[in-house]
Amino acid sequence: MSANPFSASAAPESGEARFDLDGPVATVTLCRPQVLNAQTPALWADLREFGRTLPGDVRVVIVRGEGRAFSAGLDTTAATAMLGEIAAGPDSDTRIAGFQEAFAWLRRPSLISIAAVQGHAIGAGFQVALACDFRVAAEDVSFSMAEIKLGLVPDLGGTKRLVELVGYARALELCVTGRRVAAAEASQIGLANVVVPRDELDDAAKDLAAAVLAGPRDAVIEIKALLAQAAVHTFAEQEAAERAAQLRRIADLTGRGE
């Protein structure tokens, strides 16, 4: 890669993803369509590095999958070897933490992340969609937390977001059964922000990105922070946080900020 690899478009060494930059919008494209964008540790390493080197002026990240599926989850051809290495290695916890970093940066307070999801979003594919702030879904979408079918648990950050979106009982049901959730149900239970025809998916994601960009960046960041902490705050704590955020905005708008 060049010194500024995201000035336009970059494909990492694995060739399993592509990263494109268009001003304040970065797009991550999973590009293994021949295997429904199944994920590998090499892909996770590339996503982690992209998150670490993302330019500071990026405000919106769109995550999409090339071809007919968003991501069918863990590449089962690599799974046996990977699980064996984790079981035998002295740094097993550190390795899994590294995998989690591939998705965690999508929750960064300074970013709004949008998953444009079509076809299968299974297991790790579901979890990368959950890592995003918004999910724009095509009418053919099928979400599933399928780790249970491999005797595993979701471990890429998806459990917390799933409970936040659909509640404990529904999240538990989805995780222990691995059943598939189609577009209509995803919209009904809060997994999808919007459902559109397949051929309108990319445009819908771009329209949502444009709507986010229409708001002042600092105000968007403050609002995201307020909502992210609301569930764990009392009313008094949340009202205090709102006051503090509003005073920062007023100071900035009146030229009295630091």
Image (cartoon, helix red, strand yellow):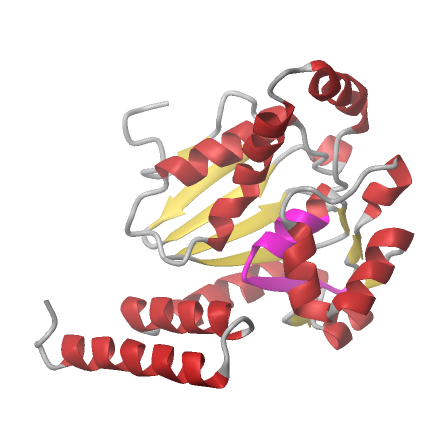
Q: Tell me where residue 159 appears, x and y as whole percent.
A: 69, 54
Does residue 84 show up? yes
The mark total stands at 0
- Horizontal side, residue 75 vs residue 63: left or right: right
Place residue 188 in its image quadrant.
bottom right
Does residue 178 show up? no
Stretch of the chain drawn in magenta: 126-139
**220 or 206: which is nearer to us?**
220
Compared with residue 101, is residue 199 higher up or lower down, i.e. above or below?
A: below
Q: Residue at x 77, y 52 (%)?
A: 119
Image quadrant occupied by the N terminus: top left
- Horizontal side, residue 105 vs residue 2: left or right: right
Place residue 180 in its image quadrant.
bottom right
- Horizontal side, residue 55 vs residue 237: left or right: left
**87 or 183: which is nearer to us?**
87
Say whether residue 241 is magenta: no
Q: Residue at x 10, y 67 (%)?
A: 258
Q: Tell me where residue 254 appears, x and y as whole percent.
A: 11, 82
Q: Tell me where residue 177 appears, x and y as whole percent.
A: 91, 54
Compared with residue 179, is residue 12 higher up or lower down, i.e. above or below?
A: above
Q: Residue at x 29, y 48 (%)?
A: 56
Q: Residue at x 50, y 20 (%)?
A: 13
